[in-house]
Image (cartoon, rainbow, N blue to C red):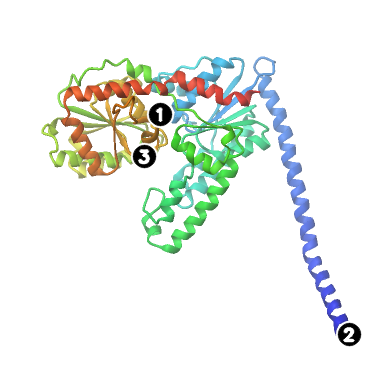
Amino acid sequence: MAAAEGVWSLCNLLRFLNSLFFPGLIVCGTLCVCLVIVLWGIRLLLQRKKKLVSTRKTGKNQMVIAFFHPYCNAGGGGERVLWCALRALQKKYPEAVYVVYTGDVNVSGQQILEGAFRRFNIRLIHPVQFVFLRKRYLVEDSLYPHFTLLGQSLGSVFLSWEALMQCVPDVYIDSMGYAFTLPLFKYIGGCQVGSYVHYPTISTDMLSIVKNQNVGLNNAAFITRNPFLSKVKLIYYYLFAFIYGLVGSCSDVVMVNSSWTLNHILSLWKVGNCTNIVYPPCDVQTFLDIPLHEKKTTPGHLLVSVGQFRPEKNHPLQIRAFAKLLNKKMVESSPSLKLVLIGGCRNKDDELRVNQLRRLSEDLGVQEYVEFKINIPFDELKNYLSEATIGLHTMWNEHFGIGVVECMAAGTIILAHNSGGPKLDIVVPHKGDITGFLAESEEGYAETMAHILSMSAEKRLQIRKSARASVSRFSDQEFEVAFLSSVEKLFK
């Protein structure tokens, strides 16, 4: 009797649970089916829109090739890759329609193209259509004081939705590193998708910093001092890295700009069968045209830095090391030294950083010897490099370093950070000869600058010749060959 009551009770319990969960399962299942139907309907509408876009100009079915580059009017190395990639594709596929998704709504398309020519000496062969995005603020780091990586990544999804609603391409290439946009264009837009990765959104180095509770650009001191917060952040980073790997693996073609980036992307995305190193294009020949004579027409020594005014470039390290060089009187001619920081400002945050750097120079008492050159024309950049003795680079784990290559090609002696692309790919011996120097700390930079300045003119000339001979592998021509070979799969 007791057993029968037990069975009866169990049956009642199952009925009760079924009454709770079965309707819920039906509702969830129905919602999922509806979502699939809606997404499929959107995809069909987008496919129709794609056909209209591709036939709009000539009435013929033209391939539409789009680049996602929200900051295409900036003056950094990533933008040089964009314009060289467009130029290479236009040479091979002249009949295609080319589109750039950009958030630079305060300028016209013509002004963007003129800026590319002025800064990079690049002029495209055929017209480009610009799709202007109004929601670029969604990928600004200032919008997300906490969980910045997740916030910017989710913001890029909404920004790419805005892009997709305006133009549906046949081939989509993310040239800025917004991997979370790839599934949207591939599965909703029905596009062939490719990626050119300058810098992984998250890297195993970042995971190590948090795991070891080290202070860094992405790890504030108050988190490193709290074991609980460090564990929470580490879990967050591991989860983000897992999702980043999933969305990145959607790419049909992956191009990375250096050996350092390759190692991280292979570890995170696990798509080695479609991943290639494509060194970014550097205007090597233009700088090689500068006569190689021992410096220079001006008295003293000029030290230059080339790079956008972004926090990761670590310009404060350059100013502090330079101040230490002057204050310690490491070289006899210290009053005749001058440091010129050359770079692009993308927005008000970058302009604020420049003002902070000016104040740092004043605080260290070296403002008379430090100059800032913002968004200068290409010819002016070339003139500065032609006069400089030392080229400075201070970013930790720089993914590649186009500015480093340009300095070497121009005949400056490069002093770069002992990490990332400069260490693995660029400032390496050429036929057994030194091509430049690497450092890490303020003291290391100051001492190495003093060592370079104390060298004989003949020794410096020998290093500059070796550096110049090593940079031909980073030319525009080499980039075009490697880029077109990598993306060929997208056009079959």
The spot of residue 288 in percent (x, y) is 33, 17
Q: Earlier in the sequence, mark 3 or mark 1?
A: 1
The spot of residue 114 in percent (x, y) is 43, 20
Query: 473 left or right of 61?
Result: left
Toward which corner of the image does residue 437 lie, by quadrant?
Answer: top left
Label 3 – label 1 distance at C-alpha? 23 Å
Q: Nearer the viewer, mark 3 or mark 1?
A: 3
Return the residue at label 1. 75
Return the residue at label 3. 419
Q: Disc count in the image?
A: 3
Q: Evaluate whether residue 7 shows in this view.
A: yes
The spot of residue 436 in percent (x, y) is 29, 30
Query: Residue type at mark 2?
Result: Met
Q: Which mark is residue 1?
A: 2
Label 1 – label 2 distance at C-alpha? 85 Å
Which secondary structure lies at badge 1?
loop
Q: Earlier in the sequence, mark 1 or mark 2?
A: 2
Query: Which of 116/483 is in front?
Result: 483
